[in-house]
Amino acid sequence: QVQLVESGGSLVQAGGSLRLSCVSSGSRFRFNTMAWYRQAPGKQRELVATATGGAPENYADSVKGRFTISRHSTANSVYLQMNSLKAEDTAVYYCNARGTYSRHDYSYWGQGTQVTVSS
């Protein structure tokens, strides 16, 4: 059974930095795409950044220049370096991993990690 476990969320002051990690286990294949999403209270879940094999990283406009997504070279792990944090970055951050194996599409979610930015 595939599991994604996020970590690194915390309370931080505006202007500070955090590094989120997402480690997966149980997959028989390397995910084609790993991504970070976030959901603030009362809002829909939104895409933050994606890392897809063979393609440039993709970022939401609101985090460009401040956040950096990276993947482990071989393992199914993904990280999100968040700098210059703002109060509006406060949300639960979720890791998503997806790919195709044996002609089936798979998508998995982690449980989320809370990021709170105090102004």
Image (cartoon, helix red, strand yellow):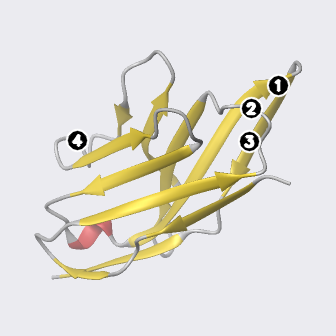
Please provide percent x and percent y for residue 64: 22, 41
How many residues crowd around disc 2 within 10 Å: few (fewer than 14), some, or many (20 or more)? Answer: few
- Marks 1 and 3 in Cβ contact (< 8 Å): no
Of the two numbered discs 2 and 1 on the same chain, state the one appearing first in sequence: 2
Q: Residue at x 82, y 25 (%)?
A: 101
Circles 2 and 1, Cβ within 8 Å, touching? The answer is yes
SS assignment at label 3: strand
Q: Residues within 10 Å of mark 3 (few under 14, many from 20)?
A: few
Mark 4 or 2: the one toward you: 2
How far apart are the two marked residues, 4 and 1, measured between alpha carbons?
31 Å
Amino acid residing under circle 4? Lys
Task: Please name the amino acid that badge 2 sits on.
Answer: Phe
Q: Which residue is mark 4?
A: 64
Q: CA distance from mark 1 to mark 3?
A: 11 Å
Residue where numbered disc 2 is placed: 29
Residue under numbered circle 3: 107
Work out how far the residue at label 2 is from the one at label 1, CA to CA, in angstroms: 7 Å
Between marks 4 and 1 in the image, the one whose residue lies nearer the viewer: 1
Q: Residue at x 79, y 52 (%)?
A: 2
Provide residue 75's location: percent of width, then percent of height. 57, 40
Q: Earlier in the sequence, mark 4 or mark 1?
A: 4
Whether residue 53 is situated above or below residue 42 in the rendered picture: above
**For residue 101, which numbered disc appears in the image?**
1
Q: CA distance from mark 4 to mark 3?
A: 25 Å
On screen, residue 107 versus residue 79, left or right, reads right
In this view, the residue in front, 85 or 18, is 18
Say which element carries label 4: loop
Percent across and percent down for residue 111 are: 64, 68
Real-space Cα distance between discs 3 and 2? Answer: 12 Å
